[in-house]
Image (cartoon, rainbow, N blue to C red):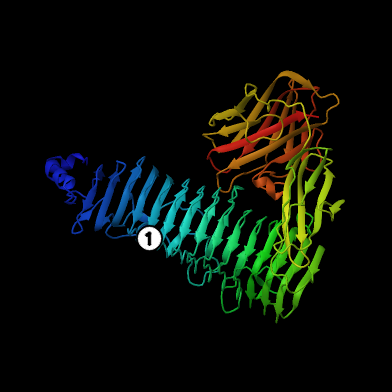
Amino acid sequence: MITFSKSRVALLPVLLALCLCGASLAADDESEPLIITADTTLDPGRTYGPIVVQASGITIDGRGAWLIGAEEGDPTDFHGSAIAAEGVSNVTLRNVNAKGWETGLHVVDGSGWTIEDCDFSDNFHDPAFGWGENGRRGGILLERVTGSTLQRNKANRVWDACVLVDSSDNVLEDNDFSHTSNTCLKLWTACRNTVRNNNLSYGLRKDPGEVHARDSTCVLMESGSNDNHFIGNDCTHGGDGIFVRVLNNWVSTGNVFEDNDCSYANNNCVEAWSPRNTWLRNKANHGSYGFWLGASDQNEVIENEASFNGLPDGFHNSPHLPDDGHAGIVFMFGPSSHTVVRGNRCEGNNGAGIAAIGDLDSGGQKWNAFHWIIEQNELVENRWGIYLQHAQLFDLAANRFEGNTVAEVEQVENVVGLIEHNGPAGITQPPVAVLRGPDMVQVGDLVSFDASTSSDPNDRLLSYRWFVGPETTGENATLGHAFPEPGFYRVALTVNNGLLSDLDWRDVYAIEPVDELGTEGETAAWSWIDPDSIVEFTPDHDVRLLGETSLRANVHPYSGGRVTLRCALAQPVTLAGRSQLVFWLKTRNENVPAWQDVNPLITLTGADGQILQLTPARDFLSAPPYIEAREGWTYFSVPLTGDEQWQSTGSVPDAVQTIDLGFDSWGAPPLVIWVDGLGLQ
């Protein structure tokens, strides 16, 4: 049934009868929320105030009725939600219009919603806002909503047209979420959603004459938004077209972007900083850059258009290639290992068609663009067809070059292991590389990596190229290798059928046995220091490297200051013959921009009360030693007497009684910290 506020009690019999008979329902006092608990049809001739949905399995048909918040005034002063629901599911909402609110529709903790033919335009809108975050609000906000469908809705002239937070397995189709001041669609920890044939254009916040667009974008994905499928969407004329952002080291992977148009972006038609995403037949033309894929390891960029970017008479912001150059496809300012760029058309870019650039500041010492295939691309009338700098282990083949004014392939500096294949012209399909082998090994053990099940669609003879490190390469179908030290390693495989190539890889953790202190199946030794935080310690059987468990620390609530995890040993551990503290660390920090100060800060307290502090030279969590540590494990081997990476303060005790690991983040969301293999060696 329908329930009402006290102001409607006198009308209850009449309104209830109308509703139960399927008749129109009108509101008499727009200041009080209309609470709906049964199938309801609104009166299109009346104006409504807020609605609260409190029942599952119902249908609300607005028949075009309006829910009006503020009649006039600055949209940044709009308040409340036109329609709100929490903890209800299987609701159909159709044909409702709402304007003048902070948020048009806000659903929390529900599933099976159908939202169709609604208009949530002209709610909170802030084109004058500067850089940074300004809340989740505007058109539609879904939090922890699953298995729902949004189709043929509108949300224009709002801050965010549609936001999915912790919301997965939804379908968004044929919606008009265009012309927003922040994003047309935003995903935060939103997985396995299908986004098809939507108008997501003009996600743009920019004053006339302004250079950048303040991180406004048509699509923004961040913080573990995995395995989504974007198909045939209009993402044109944005600050960026599609932006996969990683400000807190929580990457978004497994997403497929297919047949989307991201052209005419003020900055980058596509900007992404996450591994293992696929870009297939998208358009990225007439922006400052077509594809900017920094720190995008293991991406596949297949059969896209990336043309006419960085032109003097078009968008040309942030030229980073020589002579104010731009690019159609560029990987820069972040590592890019295990990358395939195949079958793309890059025409008329003011700079490179395709550019792969390692770390410029260190001359490639921190990272190279590593293990690439660039083949079957059309590179026409750019300055450089392909531009390589600080690049290693590249295979090029069957690219068509025409009219590039400076060079077809420009090898600028530190290009190692480049092969340009010239094989039979009749080969049009690449092989399929398959690498079988472990991703975790014991230090010193000889292990085998096997590519013998790799295949070619035309049964052509395959050749193999392996790379593990400077001393380990191979040309056979199998490779044996022993990893000498604990840590993270990349294993790279390229197979070739005489002209075309494919690649596979393994990210390998080499572990060394250690007498674990507090990280194997126990939590009683652990406590924390930070009175405004609460930490729950649990053994984690699923996320681990050594033994049967790691230690998982859930910090929630978190104060926002330094929280210290303390392991109090049952008996002091002598340091005789021991010179280093070792451990593996993995974290997840939802806060933007994640960590501050230095991390992790280590303190050892001796049985006699002596204190030894080991301070890292930099924040190893904001800037991990290798990019894969953003989602994986980092190995720490910390010398007790310090080195160039660790400052040692105080005296090394004879025996250790407590071990402290301190962490400091900018904000105060939940933190999750895993520790494994903690020991003294």
Q: How far across and how far down the image is residue 111, in percent?
A: 40, 44
The residue drawn where x is 72% and y is 43% is 439
The residue drawn where x is 59% and y is 37% is 672
Is any part of residue 625 visible from this angle?
no
Q: Nearer the viewer, residue 539 or 70?
A: 539
Residue at far top of view: 571
The residue drawn where x is 78% and y is 60% is 462
* Residue at numbered disc 1: 155
Q: Nearer the viewer, residue 465 or 561?
A: 465
What amino acid does circle 1 point to? Answer: Ala
Q: How far across and how far down the image is residue 327, in percent?
A: 65, 70
Which secondary structure lies at badge 1? Answer: loop
Residue at far front of view: 459
Quadrant in the picture for the N terminus: top left
455 relative to 478 in the view: left or right: left
Q: How far across and how far down the image is residue 635, in percent?
A: 74, 39
- Total count of labels: 1
The residue drawn where x is 47% and y is 63% is 203
Residue at far right of view: 471
Q: Is residue 175 above or below residue 285?
A: above
* Mark 1 crowd level (few <14, some 14–19, many ≥20, 10 Å Cα): many
Q: Nearer the viewer, residue 514 or 98?
A: 514
Q: How far across and how far down the image is residue 429, in percent?
A: 69, 66
Q: Quadrant of residue 631?
A: top right
Q: Quadrant of residue 531?
A: top right
624 relative to 485 in the view: left or right: left
Q: Quadrant of residue 271?
A: bottom right
Quadrant in the picture for the C terminus: top right
Is any part of residue 479 visible from this angle?
yes
